[in-house]
Structure formats: C-alpha cells, structure tokens
Image: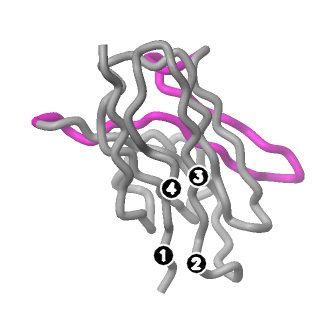
C-alpha cells in the first residue's frame, strides 16, 4: 500500500508564502503524475496543480485561480512533489491534499476521481 505524506501547511498572513511537500512511502511506486487538490469548509474538493513525467519531460498544470502565484515541482524517481505558494490570499484557505495517479492521459489530471493515492491533508490558513 502506498502512502503519501504531506507537510508544510500552517498559518500565514495574506501576501505571504508557504511551501508544501509530499513524499510517497514506497519508492517502487511508479506514478505518472502527482498533484495537489484543496478543500475548503462547505466546498467540494478542487484541483490546484499537477505535474507529470513522460519521455524525459516534465509538464505542469494549474487551476486558473493559482496561475502565476503557485509553482509545482517534483521528482519522479523519488515520488515527491512540492507546491510553492506565493501571494497567498484568504480564499486559498483550505485543507490541501497530495495525490498520485498512474494514468498517463493528462486530460484526467484535473479530476480527483482519477487519482489512485491520497495523502491525509495539511491545513493552510491565510489570514486577512
């Protein structure tokens, strides 16, 4: 069983930065993409960003709400992924979840149902 472990959440003022990290417990697990989703109280889980690896290339995908502010990076060989969050806003407050998928079609990367493994979540709170 693969476990994803997140770290790096916390409380920050608006305009500040945080960096989330996620690592898979089993290095033999070969994911095709890893991503971040978030869920605010009373709202559905939503896509934030994903990164995929194919043919020696790395690709990144972002929700419109975080483009230009968040940067995803990762290491396929180590099954790790990071989310650098800058210029944080109160509306970014949510529990952030790391996820991994073995699907190779990028069409599905924004859809939580197509991720196979999930972390336990880490709270990010942005105060105004």
Quick one: SS at disc 4? Answer: strand
Of tags 2 and 4, the one toward the viewer is 4
Of tags 3 and 2, the one toward the viewer is 3
> Circles 3 and 4: CB distance less than 8 Å?
yes
Considering every residue shown, the one lying at the far bottom of the view is 1
Q: Residue at x 41, y 41 (%)?
A: 10
Crowding at dot 1, Cα within 10 Å, few <14 / some 14-19 / many 20+, comes out as: some
Q: Which mark is residue 25?
A: 2
Does residue 51 belong to the magenta stretch?
A: yes
Q: Which residues are magenta?
A: 42-67
> Circles 2 and 1: CB distance less than 8 Å?
yes
Crowding at dot 3, Cα within 10 Å, few <14 / some 14-19 / many 20+, comes out as: many
Quick one: SS at disc 3? Answer: strand
**Mark sitting earlier along the chain (2/1):** 1
For the residues labelled 2 and 1, the Cα–Cα distance comes to 5 Å
**Depth check, front residue: 43 or 108:** 43
Picture coordinates of residue 76 (x, y %)? Answer: 75, 60
**Mark sitting earlier along the chain (2/4):** 4
Of tags 4 and 1, the one toward the viewer is 4
Picture coordinates of residue 43 (x, y %)? Answer: 16, 34
């Amino acid at each position: 069983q693969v476990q994803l472990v997140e770290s790096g959440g916390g409380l920050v003022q608006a305009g500040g930065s945080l960096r989330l990290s996620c690592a898979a417990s089993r290095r033999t697990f070969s994911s095709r993409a890893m991503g971040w989703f978030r869920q605010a109280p009373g709202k559905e889980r939503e896509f934030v960003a994903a990164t995929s690896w194919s043919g020696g290339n790395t690709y990144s995908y972002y929700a419109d709400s975080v483009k230009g502010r968040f940067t995803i990076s990762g290491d396929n060989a180590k099954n790790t992924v990071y989310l650098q969050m800058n210029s944080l806003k109160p509306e970014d407050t949510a529990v952030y979840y790391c996820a991994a998928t073995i699907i190779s079609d990028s069409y599905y990367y924004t859809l939580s149902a197509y991720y196979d493994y999930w972390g336990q979540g880490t709270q990010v709170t942005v105060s105004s």
